[in-house]
Amino acid sequence: MRENPVTRPIAELSGDLRLGKLTSLDLVENALDRITMLDRKLESFVCLAEDARDQAAAADREIAQGRWRSPLHGVPVAVKDNYLTADMPSRAGTDAPGVHFAREDCAVVAKLRKAGAIIVGKTRMHEFAWGNVTPPSKNPWNLSCVPGGSSGGSGAVVAARIVPMAMGSDTGGSIRIPAALCGTVGLKPTFGRVSRAGIVPHSWSLDHAGPLSYTVADSVHALNAISGHDPKDPGSARADVADFTAALGQPLTGLRIGICLNHMFDNNQPDVDAAIDAAIRFYRDAGARLVEFELPILAFGLGAIFAIELSSSTAYHSRNLTSGAVTGFTDDVRTLVEMGRLVTGPDYLKAEQLRRVLIEDLAKVFADIDVIIGPTCPLTAWPIGEWTVRVGTQDESVLAASWRLTYPWNLAGLPAISLPCGFDRAGLPIGLQLASRPFDEMTLIRAADAYERGHDWKDMRPKL
Amino acid sequence: MNEMEKLTEALGIQLEKQRRSTVLAAFQPIAQEIAKLRSLDLTDVHPAVVFSPVPTSQQE
């Protein structure tokens, strides 16, 4: 057995598992060893499955009997702490007394288990997905820096090569931000593509479920396993589910890459801008056509997402406000939950009107382009405890800056992906963000996979 | 009782005095963004929410 097999991508692991060159038990033991060795530094797992070895042994027996289920069969993965699980408690990142969640598998966990994945544990998240720091998790590239959030634990454990895939959730960037800051792939599918049933809600019309992984292909294998209509999620779409692996290995010739001249490049760290410029040149040189456009409505997007996210979160937490459980929340999250009552009904509906305009404007843009390119975050990972950093030409709140480039695609529900595209001068990862038409994950994956194959960023690993 | 206290009471928002100042201070930059949204004339735009009288379990 090669050293640390769990650090290899799912496609490789799956091939070896099917051929009997590797066992699921080997992989799970390797993952558990790495958790023991590394998570005391990263503090990114909150719970481990007691029966992970039993699950792995069962997977090995099935594979040996020729009952192979999918590329995830026998592969250890993790899920964010807001994904309900029958075999592990769920806390959604909170320690508040009086807040309880059901012990049952959410829809995505059920699908992952059906695909044969071994869920070895649950990852730390910012409390109730209301933030992008995820204390006390650390960034594997620099332990004094944040991993991002709210799926910060998933970003950290994937970047540290403990598991090849961990699920996250994304309301304003919470998959893509930790992916960018930790140097992993993070995929937010189209709104409605993946069921949220059984995931602790944050904001019903903005929440998305999706994977963080070593490679684009690894996220594709996860997407294949978890996509599909679910009547238990009112936001679930009856969209066709293709085999998304068909988009892997495709050329870029003829692809139209859109560059949004406003908002996306207004104020980014210089190293981030330089990395994105290089990525744009890569697409041009590979045969894609570059198309510039503007989306003026984005100037009003921040107010819209705040109005929706605040009022939705406060509505969800009304029981906790009434019972007083909110007093057990961390100060920042308690303030946001209490604050939502200041957003008016007309504000909420106006935000939903704004969304309609954004969706229509984007439809016009997508008549001339296939993929929108830009940075995932205007900045790289910032030091733990710092709330203001230099971004471009000005000092800015890290909380305000970090989601500026991701939340537009939550408002519009577009599929979007973050993938590594370089490092800043301090050695911290930079994320490239791509977005495509609703339910056109095929084109998104085609563009992301081609970029990844043209570079070796996915092979870079933090020294822990 | 000042105007702000009257307003929060009228809205049924129960916050201790200390919490009220914390929440209001944190809300100020957000309120500025929402004010931009309020300035837009979207009269003829249907919001991106559609009511359905059909129970969730029976929706196609």
Image: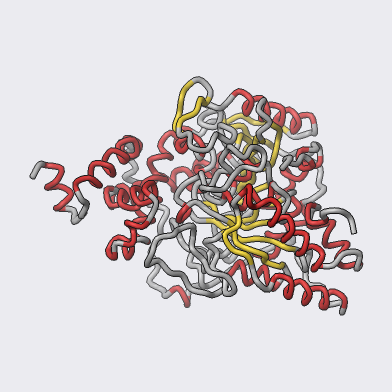
Task: Tell me if residue B51 can be seen.
Answer: yes
Task: Tell me if residue A368 can be seen.
Answer: no
- What residue do we see at 64% from left, 46% from top? A417
Rendered view: A189 above or below A28: above
Rendered view: A374 above or below A35: above
**Count of picture labels:** 0
The quadrant in which residue B3 appears is top left
- What residue do we see at 62% from left, 68% from top? A109
Q: At which x and y percent is residue B55?
A: 42, 75
Image-based side of A360 in relation to A451, left or right: left
The quadrant in which residue A327 appears is bottom left
Image-based side of A416 in relation to A225, left or right: left
* Image quarter in which the N terminus of chain B is found: top left
Q: At which x and y percent is residue A139?
A: 62, 42
Q: At which x and y percent is residue A96?
A: 40, 60
The colour scheme of the drawn protein is secondary structure
- What residue do we see at 90% from left, 59% from top? A1
- Which of the pair A181/A171 is nearer the observer? A181
Residue extending furthest left?
B1
Q: At which x and y percent is residue A388?
A: 46, 30
Image-based side of A49 in relation to A452, left or right: left
- What residue do we see at 73% from left, 50% from top? A161
- Which of the pair A45/A278 is nearer the observer? A45
